[in-house]
Image (cartoon, helix red, strand yellow):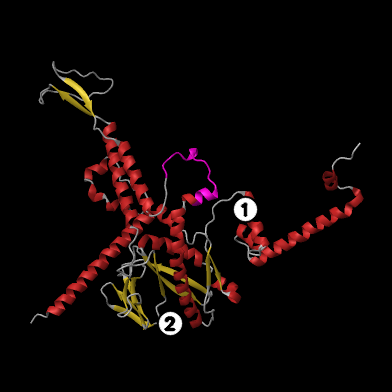
Amino acid sequence: MINSNQIVMDSQKQAKANVQADRKKLIYKLLDYYSGDNTEKYITSRFSAKAYQEVPVSSFNVTKRMIDRMSRIYTLGASRNLSAMDDKYQLMTVNKDYRLKHIEKMTRLLGTVATQVSFNAERNEFYYDPIYAFDVEMSEYDHHSVESIIFPILTATHDISSGDKLLYCYMDSSIKQIRDEDGVIISEEVNPYGFLPFVFSHRDHYLDSFFCAPAYDIVNCNEQINILLTEANLGMRFQMFGQYVVTGMYSDDSYKRAGSDEMIVLPEGASLSIEAPKVNVEQALKLARNMLELAAQNNHLSISFADTNKDRPSSGIALKIKDLERHEDYQDDLEIWRRFENNLYSIERQIAMFSGVMLPDKIGIDFNEPEYPQAVADQIAMDTWMLENDLTTKAQLLQQRNKDLSIEQAEAIIKENTEKNGAGKTNEAGAGAGQSIFSKLRSGAPKA
């Protein structure tokens, strides 16, 4: 007897598997367009094989530039405050901002990225490994809580001597398994942490699915432009070399190919002309520009195809007003990534505790926001106001101009400069009647 419930369950399972397969296929396409790797394979079906004998396929990478411009949270890094353990934590997370810059870009591109956190006890350092294509099992009672994850293990795909099957890693709070592509378990071990050491970053608040929508509009625009420019190149190819056309001549009459140094003799009543396709390349380029502008505007970006040499430099206020919409979008993203930072630190703290390192319960996070250019006078006025109201220190101002300095190093430099400058002032005052050059300049020339 056929079990109707089982048929429905199998059908639902197959439908979900198809959705996951399509999502992973799209992820690989997004990664190809970001890296600019062999993107012509996605548009070859749009052209006949003979077309490639005329011009190569256009393959421009606008995806990477747009995604990189959208990713501004970790452009200048972030300042993390753990009170007494700042120095130790900085050494443990020396590559954190470097890795998070890439993770932010991949999150903008793919929508949702899983980051595996691990700790190297020998080097006393955290590692952050982004995972792009993965499947998750959600909690039955909390659709925001991930119970398990399975993802492919990177293999030496460019090693021609490697013929192993693709391996997958399955992990939940209890076990960690290595499986082959057929689902056969190769190895299994206990998860020593007792929790999933993964943090999930989302480019936006997810709606009806755990996975956020990727930047497919940018990739689709990139694909359309590659098709359009390939067609424009084909049009130029055929338009530059016209086609000879003879009228008033029978097809069985003899004719020969001639050049600029040959004379063509035609029968009486026949005429010879050169015809070329009426291809408007300028309209094709205008359409490509409109596509790019629309895609940029939808992602709070601004691009211009005007002559940049004619642009006048703008003040910081003018730039901020012009960039107001993008700045508001940046402020919204700060809350998303602050939540991600807190979740990431929670995983770090638990892993460090497992390794015998005790970190504080909470972390203070302050993202270093990009600053708009200011006039020198405005910058001096702002710094002076900050100092007079005890909102900053000279060491902090020096550190802003030299990111490689620590607060202690900045304070030492200021102390050394103060001592040198103070000694100079003392020597100048002690000259007195000697009338130093500085005193003479201040007092002016003697009266006659």
Name the one closer to the observer, 103 or 250. 103
Residue 239 shown left or right of residue 193 in the figure: left
Secondary structure at numbered mark 2 = loop
Q: Which mark is residue 379?
A: 1
Secondary structure at numbered mark 1 = helix
Q: Which mark is residue 193?
A: 2
- Asked if the magenta segment contains residue 319, the reply would be yes
Mark 1 belongs to which amino acid?
Answer: Gln
**CB within 8 Å, label 2 to label 1:** no
Q: Seen from this angle, which residue lies furthest top? A: 268
Query: In the image, what residue occupies the spot 77% across and 57% down?
Result: 421
- Asked if the magenta segment contains residue 55, the reply would be no
Query: In the image, what residue occupies the spot 89% across and 40% down?
Result: 446
Could you tell me residue 10's position as x and y percent? 18, 75
- In whole angstroms, how far apart are the C-alphas of marks 2 and 1? 50 Å
- Residue 398 visible: no
For residue 88, above or below residue 334: below
Mark 2 belongs to which amino acid?
Answer: Tyr
Query: In the image, what residue occupies the spot 81% across and 58% down?
Result: 423
Residue 2 shown left or right of residue 314 in the figure: left
Magenta-tinted stretch = 304-320
Could you tell me residue 12's position as x and y percent? 20, 73
Tally the marks: 2
For residue 391, above or below residue 239: below
Q: Which mark is residue 408?
A: none
Query: In the image, what residue occupies the spot 47% across and 49% down?
Result: 322
Name the one closer to the observer, 401 or 151. 401
For residue 358, above or below residue 412: below
Could you tell me residue 360's position as x and y percent? 54, 79
